[in-house]
Image (spheres, rainbow, N blue to C red):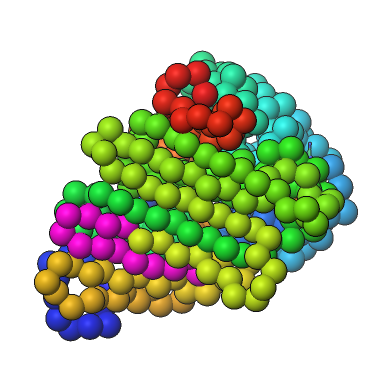
């Protein structure tokens, strides 16, 4: 990793690359041949040489098309057949979240390891039931919260862990973009939208950097002209931590004025980390992230992520981590059990917005 400015903080070097790990030979079967599989899962797996053995979709023609594009040898009619394809040890699920529990049950009955998509579930009881069922079946279940592996966020986590900005005090994630939710009819119809499908990434990534928030306060809004999109398209959330630090997460998906931004600033006692989330400037291609370390009394230092971006590169992260977890017997970093913490924050934002009050995490959110 090279800094673009020679001066300042030479001892802080972010470790942002996805570790190689073990288990990369494990066979993968994919359920769902939609957008995210075609532009993120498969390009990332292909670049890493992972073995995708089979794919299915309720729209079998779609599965055939994706299989042809990525050289996947077997297309089957449904999930029951997919989990029985010889060599499939990991089932990679990429479906709308209400479809996920029944597919998880099929995978667990066949004792396959599972990579679930985010959001893991639409209510905490369903999420807990899937986590408990995976534990009872003795298989690994991970959730595809791949923002944790995207370059800027991975670098921030590494630098914060090294103490590069001291004790965190006051941070912000501010995003103002145009997201054409109407392109996905099921997303347009979702009553809970922005946090459930988007800010859940920020909440999960922040948990990986800062730990669990103690309090959540959130306000949600809709635009008068956002039809056919039903759910909230702008949210403002304050996360407060037991040590008194805070994060503001302010996200607006209906910024139609041509000047998008997706920025973060983490401030600590010894400095600040400022950057941009490249993906949000031009989804799903995106730009390269930027990140600058400003230590108190030192010149700024910027980091270079080469050609690596959130989509598709970070999608190797959760799969590679799950493979290593299977091979070594540890829990995946973004295990289903860990994701209960992310969902607790997400659901707390809805409770806060509905009840117009702050919610203490663990108080039944
Ligand atoms: N960054 C991310 O992690 C990220 C980004 C985009 C989407 N997603 C998630 O990935 C999932 C899929 O999103 P998408 O954008 O690919 O949606 P999509 O609508 O493009 O694709 C979904 C696919 O699932 C298929 N399908 C639905 N029910 C099925 C079933 N029971 N069995 C087999 N196939 C079924 C549909 O035919 C469709 O091809 C969603 O949960 C979404 O939230 C995650």
Q: How far from the left and from the top, in percent, is residue 142? A: 50, 37
Q: Is residue 257 left or right of residue 341?
A: right
Between 255 and 341, the one lying in front of the other is 255
Q: Taking 226 as reference, is 39 left or right?
A: left
Q: Position of residue 231 (x, y in %)?
A: 72, 43
Q: Nearer the viewer, residue 346 or 169?
A: 169
Whether residue 16 appears in this view of the structure is no
Q: Residue at x 24, y 49 (%)?
A: 168
Q: Is residue 275 above or below residue 77?
A: below
Residue 126 falls inside the magenta stretch: no
Question: Residue sitting at 68 percent across and 33 percent down?
Answer: 100
- Taking depth in this image into account, of 336 and 279 the one nearest to the observer is 279
Quadrant position of residue 245: top left
Q: What residue is shown at x 84% (from left), y 42% (from top)? A: 58
The quarter of the picture where residue 298 lies is: bottom left
Q: Is residue 278 above or below residue 196?
A: below
Identify the main secondary structure in magenta.
strand
Region in magenta: 266-278
Q: Is residue 231 left or right of residue 41?
A: right
Q: Taking the image as drawn, is residue 345 in sight? A: yes
Classify 189 as above or below 256: above
Figure quadrant of the N terminus? bottom left
How far from the left and from the top, in percent, is residue 297?
12, 71
Please give the name of the residue rendered at 22% of the width and 83% of the height, measured from the top-left corner.
5
Using the rendered view, name the quadrant where residue 243 is placed: top left
- In this picture, is 350 found above or below 277? above
- Left or right side of 56 for 211: left
**Residue 247, horizontal then vertical, whole percent:** 38, 48
Callout count = 0
């Amino acid at each position: 990793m090279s800094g673009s400015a020679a001066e300042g903080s030479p001892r802080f070097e972010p470790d942002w690359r996805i570790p190689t790990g073990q288990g990369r030979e494990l066979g993968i079967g994919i359920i769902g041949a939609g957008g995210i599989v075609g532009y993120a899962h498969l390009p990332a797996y292909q670049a890493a040489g992972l073995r995708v053995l089979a794919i299915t979709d309720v729209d079998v023609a779609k599965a055939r098309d994706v299989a042809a594009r990525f050289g996947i040898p077997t297309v089957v009619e449904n999930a029951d057949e997919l989990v029985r394809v010889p060599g499939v040890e990991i089932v990679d699920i990429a479906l709308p979240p209400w479809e996920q529990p029944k597919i998880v049950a099929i995978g667990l009955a066949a004792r396959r390891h599972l990579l679930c998509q985010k959001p893991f579930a639409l209510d905490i009881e369903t999420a807990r039931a899937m986590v408990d069922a995976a534990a009872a079946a003795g298989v690994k279940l991970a959730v595809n919260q791949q923002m944790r592996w995207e370059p800027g966020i991975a670098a921030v986590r590494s630098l914060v862990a090294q103490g590069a900005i001291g004790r965190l005090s006051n941070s912000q994630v501010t995003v103002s973009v145009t997201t054409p939710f109407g392109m996905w009819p099921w997303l347009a119809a979702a009553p809970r939208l922005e946090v459930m499908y988007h800010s859940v990434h920020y909440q999960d990534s922040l948990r990986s950097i800062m730990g669990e928030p103690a309090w959540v306060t959130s306000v949600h809004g809709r635009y008068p002209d956002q039809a056919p999109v039903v759910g909230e398209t702008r949210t403002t959330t304050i996360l407060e931590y037991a040590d008194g630090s805070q994060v503001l997460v302010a996200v607006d998906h209906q910024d139609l004025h041509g000047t998008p931004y997706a920025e973060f600033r983490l401030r600590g006692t010894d400095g600040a980390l400022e950057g941009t989330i490249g993906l949000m400037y031009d989804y799903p291609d995106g730009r390269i992230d930027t990140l600058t370390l400003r230590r108190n009394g030192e010149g700024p230092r910027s980091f270079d992520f080469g050609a690596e971006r959130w989509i598709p590169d970070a999608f190797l992260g959760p799969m590679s981590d799950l493979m290593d977890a299977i091979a070594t017997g540890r829990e995946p970093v973004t295990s289903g059990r860990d994701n209960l913490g992310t969902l607790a924050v997400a659901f707390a934002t809805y409770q806060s917005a509905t009840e117009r009050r702050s919610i203490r995490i663990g108080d039944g959110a």
